[in-house]
Image (cartoon, rainbow, N blue to C red):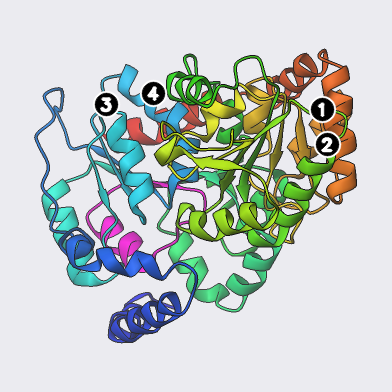
């Protein structure tokens, strides 16, 4: 099957799909995202403005990462490219990812919509030398136009869940044609590699390198977090951090925290919803559980009651608080989402609590379990019990670090593969 007809159909149907997506968001908890459509539209159409990078002898490497988590996953690679003097441009599908990249001094923009006009406009302005996709960002029009321009296209930190694999399998002939445009797939696990091959990727371009997220380094100076702790009057208080939480699991986290106060009365809570737009509904839950709290955005406000909790309603600060935590819970594990990056707090020396649903993070869950640096919990009672256990055993911090170190090395292996691909194309 050639890509020409599917792409024509894709571009014809794209406006209708965009309208349906907008309607879905309108009637969801994330409807606030629609307020920024007008201001974001030029970037979404590929009409970006870029300053010429002084070190650029050729076009920049275009790194595309879906959201904040994928941008953070790509940071070790970004550091490597910058150290080598390679010019970069990063795109992300949401504003949080773009803001994170810009905070690091990177040229960044919202990703163009995956239609001919937008991608063509972006390529004309950015003039990239290669396209590096992070995880599973298989946008057909983007890949087709980048390939037509002769750009090497690679996927790093490549992962494909069993559910996604089943869906892609329904369009395997199209996926095979799409994957044929790639020069490299750096897969996280052997299972991921086999799934890409089953969808039609050439065996010679697929390699297993591990997960870039496991190479993240702890924040060396958690300045904003330390200032917030000081403003709250929590000096020397043990802190429980619950990160990337979802509505279905927050009652268990809050009830577990309250139960833990019976034996750890000085314990304080920092809680960060997976999607910061949900801060309002999480604030209502904190009030419903009668937990005095302050939001990070108002951390310096005076309240009549001393806060026991901090609601993190700002992006990009969660890793700093992990570094100050007695223990951390990572969300997406008490519901059936399969888990977020449970190794991130461990890399900062924080023992990790996680629910039973870890099918997206099996390797780090097993490493944490084996090192006794992480513990499965199934509800409020177990959260409280494990928090007390961690409090009594400070040596568990080193065991969490040990688990994090055991899975590192993906960045070095990925950079070696990328060097070969980019050298061949230059």
Spatial separation of the CA atoms under disc 2 and disc 4: 40 Å
**Label 2 CA crowd tier, 10 Å (few <14, some 14–19, many 20+):** many
Q: Which mark is residue 264?
A: 1
| Left or right side of 127 for 352 | right
Residue 262: name its quadrant: top right
Closer to the observer: label 3 or label 2?
A: 2
Of callouts 3 and 4, which one flags the residue occurring earlier in the amino acid sequence? 4
Q: Residue at x 38, y 46 (%)?
A: 97
Q: Which mark is residue 79?
A: 4
Spatial separation of the CA atoms under disc 1 and disc 2: 6 Å
| Left or right side of 96 for 383 | right
Spatial separation of the CA atoms under disc 1 and disc 4: 41 Å
**Label 1 CA crowd tier, 10 Å (few <14, some 14–19, many 20+):** some
373 or 111, nearer to the observer: 373
Q: Which residues are magenta?
A: 132-155
105 or 34, nearer to the observer: 34
Closer to the observer: label 2 or label 4?
A: 2
25 or 382, nearer to the observer: 382
Q: Which mark is residue 260?
A: 2
- Image location (x, y in percent) of residue 412: 53, 23
């Amino acid at each position: 099957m050639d890509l020409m007809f599917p792409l024509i159909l894709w571009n014809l149907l794209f406006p209708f799909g965009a309208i349906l997506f907008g309607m879905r968001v309108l009637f969801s908890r994330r409807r606030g995202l629609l307020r920024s459509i007008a201001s974001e539209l030029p970037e979404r159409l590929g009409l970006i403005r870029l300053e010429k990078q002084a070190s650029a002898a050729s076009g920049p490497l275009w790194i595309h990462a879906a959201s904040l988590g994928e941008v953070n996953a790509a940071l070790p690679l970004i550091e490597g490219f910058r150290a080598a003097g390679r010019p970069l441009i990063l795109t992300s599908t949401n504003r949080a990812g773009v803001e994170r990249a810009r905070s690091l001094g990177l040229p960044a923009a919202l990703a163009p919509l995956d239609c001919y006009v937008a991608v063509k406009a972006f390529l004309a302005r950015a003039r990239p030398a290669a396209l590096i996709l992070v995880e599973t960002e298989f946008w057909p029009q983007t890949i087709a136009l980048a390939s037509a321009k002769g750009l090497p296209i690679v996927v790093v930190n490549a992962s494909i869940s069993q559910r996604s694999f089943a869906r892609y399998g329904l369009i395997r002939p199209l996926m095979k044609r799409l994957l044929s445009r790639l020069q490299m797939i750096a897969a996280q696990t052997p299972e991921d590699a086999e799934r890409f091959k089953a969808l039609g990727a050439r065996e010679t371009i697929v390699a297993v390198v591990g997960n870039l997220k496991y190479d993240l380094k702890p924040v060396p100076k958690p300045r904003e977090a330390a200032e917030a702790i000081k403003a709250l009057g929590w000096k020397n208080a043990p802190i429980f951090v619950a990160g990337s939480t979802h509505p279905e699991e927050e009652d268990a986290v809050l009830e577990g925290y309250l139960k833990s106060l019976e034996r750890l009365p000085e314990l304080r809570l920092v809680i960060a919803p997976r999607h910061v737009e949900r801060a309002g509904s999480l604030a209502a839950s904190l009030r419903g559980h009668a937990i005095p709290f302050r939001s990070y955005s108002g951390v310096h406000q005076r309240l009549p009651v001393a806060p026991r909790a901090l609601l993190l309603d700002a992006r990009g600060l969660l890793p700093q608080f992990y570094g100050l935590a007695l223990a951390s819970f990572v969300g997406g594990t008490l519901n059936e989402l399969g888990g977020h990056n449970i190794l991130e707090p461990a890399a900062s020396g924080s023992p990790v609590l996680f629910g039973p649903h870890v099918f997206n993070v099996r390797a780090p869950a097993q490493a944490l379990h084996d090192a006794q640096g992480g513990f499965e919990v199934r509800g409020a009672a177990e959260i409280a019990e494990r928090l007390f256990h961690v409090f009594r055993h400070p040596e568990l911090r080193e065991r969490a670090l040990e688990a994090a170190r055991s899975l590192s090395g993906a960045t070095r292996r990925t950079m070696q593969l990328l060097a070969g691909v980019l050298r061949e194309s230059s």
